[in-house]
Amino acid sequence: MQQSVSRQDFDRWMVPAYSPASFVPDRAEGSRLWDQNGKEYIDFAGGIAVNALGHAHPELQQALMQQAAKLWHTGNGYTNAPILRLAKQLIDATFAERVFFCNSGAEANEAALKLARKYAHDIFGPEKSGIIAFKTAFPGRTLLTVSAGGQPAYSKDFAPLPGGIEHAVFNDLDSVAALINDQTAAVIVEPIQGEGGVMPAEPAFLCGLRELCDRHNALLIFDEVQSGVGRTGSLYAYMHYGVTPDVLSTAKALGGGFPIGAMLTTEKLGAVLNVGSHGTTYGGNPLAGAVGGKVMELINRPDVLEGVQLRHRWFTDGLNEINQRLHLFKEIRGLGLLIGCVLNEDFSGKAKQFSLAAAEEGVMVLIAGANVVRFAPALIISEQDVQEGLARFARACESVIKGGS
Ligand SMILES: Cc1ncc(COP(=O)(O)O)c(C=O)c1O
């Protein structure tokens, strides 16, 4: 007999680093999820842009179960077929010629930043070590990535922080030009900032970053942890913009819910991470490789990627209709199925209230800061689930207006 547990047990047993919803998810299928009491939710949150193929996708289940019956883990003293196949899929589908696997987005960015510093040190000498990141970025929670994040709220309590990182303003090329010089090893940027408020980069900004990096022999790192694997309607957002980075980090949707991260780069740059220079016990695990390979196979198809644009319109049409009636958002922005509704002055700072009211009505949404309600659903969500979920979200908005949440 398993012990029965409830949301209250979280507060009794867990470090209070999170404040999870009042309900406990129990099972899910596609874009519908049920809690311990059997209440149904439509999932517009997608496990924070992770469940790109929804929940319990039959082909992902099969890939995981088949691998689970065969080989789980060996450690990185050995390689394995599923992870090699996934590496080849990523290489065939992108600019990359070499891949490093890890377990999360933060680790992928950590690997990217370490690669950039090692490349700069090896080729140009130890003075070349500067990193330029952006003030509203979110590259992760390790000490290096949280320092790159540029949000003191997430880093100040953990000082002393790693040095050599400066912060420019997203979409402001002049602010980067003012910081970059020949001692800069890398610029790290999200092509569309997720946690920072669902803010797409201006195309000219990314082109300008590419030029500045080339001029100063600095590596351009795209953090595509949230924007990657089909989220914007391109396999990676760099393809949408037509600006190719030197290094790209990917995670979240790559495993469709199974933890995996990867750093993609060129043969020349990848070569600096020689034997023993970097590593992780689980990175490149056969289970993650098997699931990631199936995710790539199912998402990197024209019909799925074009379907993301179609679904973008279902969402934005529905959200615009809600807004015309209720006057809540000053902007609805984003790319593909990463969409943010920016609350107007009357509702400023109340994004959390909208997400709580949405859960009450049976739809899960995300926030991105205090002013943005964010949607990152499955890339294959059905029209019926989108319409039903938006109807529930509209009721949630009405209840916030009435002061019910
Ligand atoms: C753009 C971006 N980079 C990195 C991360 C960190 O990923 P993880 O939480 O898997 O470490 C996130 C997480 O939200 C993210 O959105």
Image (spheres, helix red, strand yellow):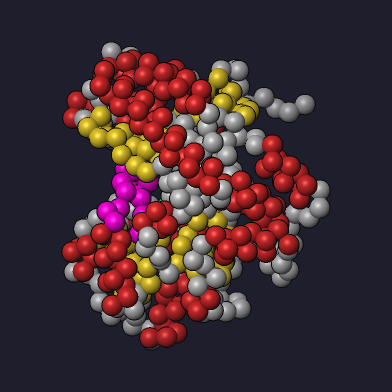
- Relative to 403, is 257 above or below? below
**Front residue (pair 143, 157):** 143
Question: Residue 244, image x and y in percent?
Answer: 40, 65
Q: Residue at x 28, y 77 (%)?
A: 215
Q: Residue furthest right?
A: 69
**Front residue (pair 14, 204):** 204
Report the quarter where the C terminus lies.
Answer: top left
- Relative to 269, is 9 above or below? above
Q: Magenta region, mostly helix, strand or loop?
A: loop
**Front residue (pair 169, 236):** 236
The stretch drawn in magenta includes residue 362: no
Report the magenta residues as a range. Answer: 189-203
Q: Residue at x 58, y 44 (%)?
A: 256
**Front residue (pair 379, 11):** 379
Report the quarter where the N terminus lies.
Answer: top right
Q: Is residue 327 visible?
A: yes
Q: Is residue 197 left or right of residue 271?
A: left
Question: Residue 328, image x and y in percent?
Answer: 25, 25
Question: Residue 402, image x and y in percent?
Answer: 28, 13
Q: Is residue 159 visible?
A: no
**Residue 312, quarter of picture:** top left
Question: Residue 246, image x and y in percent?
Answer: 43, 69
- Relative to 15, is 402 above or below? above
Q: Residue at x 29, y 78 (%)?
A: 216
